[in-house]
Image (tube, helix red, strand yellow):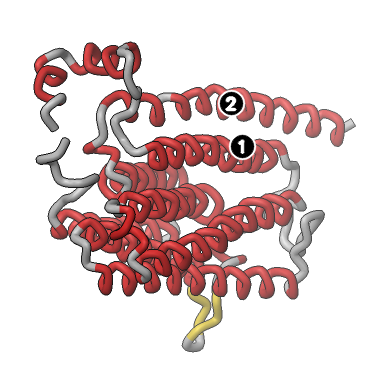
Amino acid sequence: MSDAKEGQQHPLAVYLWIWLLLFVLSTFSYLVDYFHLHGMLRWSLILLFMLLKAGFIVAIFMHMAWERLALKLAILLPPLCLLVLIGFMAIEGDYTFLTRGAAFLR
Amino acid sequence: MAHDAPATALGPLQQVAGDFAADKQAFSVPWGKAMMWIFLLSDTFIFSCFLTSYMNVRISTMSAWPNPSQVFALHLFGQDIPLILIAIMTFVLITSSGTMALAVNYGYRRDRRHTVMLLCATAALGATFVGMQAFEWTKLITEGVRPWGNPWGAPQFGSSFFMITGFHGCHVTAGVIYLLITAKRVASGFYDRKGSYETVEVAGLYWHFVDLVWVFIFAFFYLW
């Protein structure tokens, strides 16, 4: 390790380009609301810009792209089980909505 | 890094198996960085629980959800601009993320003056964000938003809003304090005596995470 540079050192230009990109992506996601887009187009664009922004922050600003695979897997895999929670809670929410509807109609 | 050469000759999964199974430290990063990542992982679960519960109440409510575009509009220059305050807050936080990334970079170059300046700029932008959030809360509370109700529709709107943005605001506030302490230590030459500026990068991880959480809150709470 003695000949290696300390920690995560990368050219300044990488950060400046990603910074600019994050500004552009944020502007895009604001414009989605500004132009009153609706339905699937609105939701897919919101998700697309959100995931791109999150990806660039984690990969470049938080240096995850340059870490060893062991750390990447240990940190990035566990949140995937949240998809199960989100799926269950979406089903449960629909069920609550339907039972409330049935109860209020009666 | 001499020990990388044989590891990369193996497949990536064999490298992972080696890192975890060999009789050595599993993660080849300073312990502070590994622990910060594990803390951020746990924080990911907390914020995800809040956002999932928000999704659940928004799906299951019988009354219409208030339109965030109008709720968070500001009357500026003689017209209502939708969501403008939130957009400005987003840009303030992204700017602070950029100054933080530069602070980490200048720290590794042993450029103390620029590192301190960039850390203080990041903290100032974070404080600006919290200030704007306090303005937003004040505005909504005067308009009658409460955790149990609001003038525009689903009562769950208030509890989700105060819980999610409040918890995020606490993180930003803690981050501002954390950054100021780090800046003071950089200024005093603490990390030069220690011989490592990796603590600045660890502080940066926390700050970028706060920005990362805001990306999700902005998408799901304000835009959806």
- Near mark 2 (Cα within 10 A), the count class, few <14, some 14-19 or many ≥20, is some
Q: Residue at x 16, y 54 (%)?
A: A14
- Whether B213 is drawn above or below B7: the answer is below
Q: Residue at x 55, y 73 (%)?
A: B132
**Which mark identifies residue B49?**
1
Q: In this view, does B123 lie to the left or right of A48?
A: right
Q: Which residue is drawn at 43% across and 71% down?
A: B125
- Whether B133 is drawn above or below B205: the answer is below
Q: Is residue B154 left or right of residue B180?
A: right
Task: Using the image as rendered, state which of residue A94 and residue A29 is in the foreground.
Answer: A29
Is residue A28 shown to the viewer in this render? no
Q: Residue at x 56, y 51 (%)?
A: B221
Task: Using the image as rendered, state which of residue B217 and residue A78 is in the foreground.
Answer: A78
Q: Where is residue A96 in the image (x, y as percent from the top left)?
A: 75, 30
At mark 1, the secondary structure is helix
| Amino acid type for the residue under numbered disc 1 | Cys
At mark 2, the secondary structure is helix
- Near mark 1 (Cα within 10 A), the count class, few <14, some 14-19 or many ≥20, is some
| Amino acid type for the residue under numbered disc 2 | Leu
Classify the position of the N terminus of chain B by image quarter: top left
Task: Using the image as rendered, state which of residue A53 and residue B67 is in the foreground.
Answer: A53
> What chain does mark 1 sit on?
B
Q: Is residue B213 left or right of residue A104?
A: left
> What chain does mark 2 sit on?
A
Q: In this view, does B120 lie to the left or right of B67?
A: left
Mark 2 highlights which residue?
A: A85
Q: Where is residue A106 in the image (x, y as percent from the top left)?
A: 90, 31
Q: Do the residues labelled 1 and 2 touch (CB within 8 Å)?
A: yes
Q: Splitting the image into 4 quarters, where does residue B161 fall?
A: bottom right
Q: Residue furthest bottom?
A: B78
Q: Are marks 1 and 2 on the same chain?
A: no
